[in-house]
Image (cartoon, grey):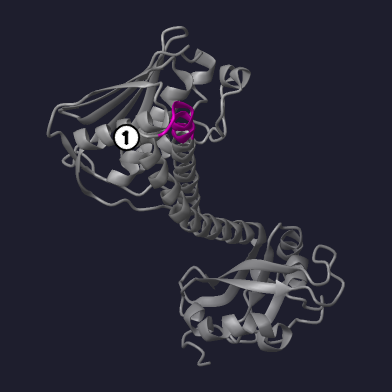
């Protein structure tokens, strides 16, 4: 590599970087730390850095990185000039503990390190040395990898299940409309249809949770934007709930032609989850209404159930949380519906809230902004 002009000689470092006191402090840090001269030679490396890259302690001083840690040099070498010119470079490195006394890295264990190389300058600005700081990110890396595998598994399973499930639903619908079946067989056909509809709903619920996990691993997710006919959307979701739960009376109130510019898929999932929750914990009646005002669109879902206690109201949107009343009633559910609904509402730039009184039912309100005030956004 060409040594940048105007830098200090390669065989010297500022006294502060050679200070025994500084090295003693760095020896006890929770991250790996190394100091290189501008020729890419080790001038200091603390025990954690040596351990991570299998560098023999005490035998590296003055040794080029290419000789002391070939794996590290394969990544550092191409960007060393860039760091010497004053730029900071970060990359991830896989390290396998295949040999040597490394207490925290048993033989054969593969770790992921995030390595940041930064220029060290004096007060006047010239680059004097190169500072490397490493952090073990194996856990984060494994979590991302597991999230990707989980998402792939759910996506594949849902794809394989949708075809057979659609067939079951189709035949169940035909059977329930048949006029030649005996009464008891018609009841059984209706049960098949209801259970198939329930399976479809649960499948969509798990897919919603998977989408949220993907958004977290990607540090955000984007939504689509389109003009949505709110009255049609509410009627379709109400009819889907009636098909699955015929004993529940769903009352829809929405002016004709109401629209909103947003993501129809996410709105449908929010409304479906709120309807399911109202049907599950209500007493047989669900109210679904929408209206526009100067702040945007407001969708309300009401039930005539037992209501939610004040202490539970602050926790009902938590992932996996189920109120004590629900557990006592042994109601089905995994505590995902309301969690997904609120996360999707925030992703749309909106807000999901509730009003409830014990013994007087519960009302959930979804507020979506108008495009003029705020459109769909990404949420990390």
Q: Quadrant of residue 173?
A: top left
Q: Residues within 10 Å of mark 1 (few under 14, many from 20)?
A: some
69 lies above or below 2: above
Q: Mark 1 points at which residue?
A: 237
Quarter of the image for residue 321 reads top right
**Residue at the image point whose x is 61% and y is 56% from the top:** 143
Magenta residues, start to end: 181-191
x, y percentage for residue 264? 28, 44
Does the magenta-highlighted stretch encompass residue 189?
A: yes
Left or right of 279, for residue 375? left
Q: Can residue 344 be seen in this view?
A: no
Which one is nearer the viewer's eye here, 183 or 203? 183
Considering every residue shown, the one lying at the far right of the view is 101
The answer to whether any part of residue 371 appears in the image is yes
Outermost residue, left side: 257
Q: In this view, does 58 lie above or below 235?
A: below
Q: Position of residue 157 (x, y in %)?
A: 53, 56
Quadrant assignment, res 40: bottom right
Q: Is the magenta stretch mostly helix, strand or loop?
A: helix
Q: Which residue is drawn at 73% across and 70% down?
A: 52
Residue 32 placement (x, y as % from top left): 69, 65
Is 52 in the magenta?
no
Tell which of 303 and 80 is nearer to you.
303
Residue 2 coordinates in the image, percent (x, y): 50, 92
280 and 380: which is toward the camera:
280
Q: Residue at x 58, y 76 (%)?
A: 129
Q: Name the residue: 85% across, 76% down.
A: 100
């Amino acid at each position: 590599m060409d040594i940048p002009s105007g830098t200090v000689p390669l065989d010297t470092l500022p006294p502060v970087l050679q200070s025994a006191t500084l090295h003693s402090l760095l020896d006890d840090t929770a991250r790996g730390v190394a100091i290189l001269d501008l020729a890419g030679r080790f001038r200091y490396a603390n025990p954690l850095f040596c351990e991570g890259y299998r560098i023999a302690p005490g035998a590296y001083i003055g040794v080029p990185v290419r000789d002391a840690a070939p794996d590290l040099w394969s990544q550092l070498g191409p960007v060393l000039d860039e760091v010497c010119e004053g730029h900071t470079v970060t990359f991830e490195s896989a390290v396998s503990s295949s040999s040597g006394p490394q207490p925290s890295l048993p033989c054969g264990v593969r770790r992921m390190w995030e390595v940041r190389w930064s220029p060290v300058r004096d007060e006047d600005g010239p680059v004097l040395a190169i500072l490397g700081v490493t952090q073990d990110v194996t856990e984060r890396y494994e979590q991302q990898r597991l999230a990707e595998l989980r998402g792939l598994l759910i996506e594949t399973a849902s794809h394989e299940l949708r075809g057979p499930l659609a067939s079951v639903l189709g035949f169940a619908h035909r059977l329930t409309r048949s006029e030649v079946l005996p009464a008891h067989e018609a009841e059984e056909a209706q049960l098949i249809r209801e259970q198939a509809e329930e399976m479809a709903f649960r499948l969509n619920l798990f897919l919603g949770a998977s989408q949220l996990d993907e958004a977290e691993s990607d540090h955000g997710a984007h939504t689509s934007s389109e003009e949505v006919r709110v009255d049609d959307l509410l009627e379709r979701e109400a009819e889907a709930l009636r098909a699955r739960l015929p004993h529940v009376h769903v009352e829809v109130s929405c002016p004709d032609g109401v629209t909103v510019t947003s993501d129809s898929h996410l709105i449908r999932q929010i409304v479906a989850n709120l309807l399911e929750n109202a049907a599950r914990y209500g007493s047989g009646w669900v109210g679904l209404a929408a209206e526009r005002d100067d702040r945007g669109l407001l969708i309300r879902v009401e039930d005539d159930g037992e209501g939610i206690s004040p202490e539970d109201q602050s926790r009902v949107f938590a992932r996996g949380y189920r109120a004590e009343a629900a557990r006592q009633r042994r109601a089905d559910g995994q505590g995902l519906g309301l969690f997904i609904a609120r996360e999707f509402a925030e992703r749309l730039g909106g807000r999901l809230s509730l009003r409830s009184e014990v013994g007087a039912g519960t009302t959930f309100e979804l507020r979506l902004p108008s495009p003029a005030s705020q459109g769909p956004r990404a949420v990390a």
